[in-house]
Amino acid sequence: MISKTGNELPIGFAMELASDLDAMDIFAEMSENDQQVWIDGARRMNTKDEMRRYVHSIADQMKQKKNHK
């Protein structure tokens, strides 16, 4: 899977996005810069559980931003 920036996604990140459709939709709608920030963060995850929590936090953070507007 490749992001808008043309960078390949880390495989664990791509797999977790595929299992969390809300997070995948939100990620797909992000700007290139925002996607790159999340991709860089994903590269720092060391375990499957860390990656799962990280991906789930995409949707959680976006929901919080919407609630604060």
Image: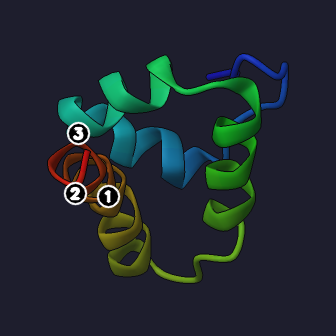
- The secondary element bearing badge 2 is classed as helix
Q: CA distance from mark 2 to mark 1?
A: 5 Å
Within the image, what quadrant is residue 40 found in?
A: bottom right
The residue carrying mark 2 is 64
Q: Nearer the viewer, mark 3 or mark 2?
A: 2
The residue carrying mark 3 is 19
Within the image, what quadrant is residue 5 found in?
A: top right
Q: CA distance from mark 3 to mark 2?
A: 21 Å
| Farthest left residue in view | 67
Residue found at x 21% / y 40%: 20
The image shows residue 30 at horizontal and vertical percentages of: 54, 27
Mark on residue 61?
1
Which of pointers 3 and 2 lies earlier in the amino acid sequence?
3
Residue found at x 20% / y 33%: 22
Q: CA distance from mark 1 to mark 3?
A: 18 Å
- The secondary element bearing badge 1 is classed as helix
Tell me whether circle 2 and circle 1 mark residues in contact (CB < 8 Å): yes
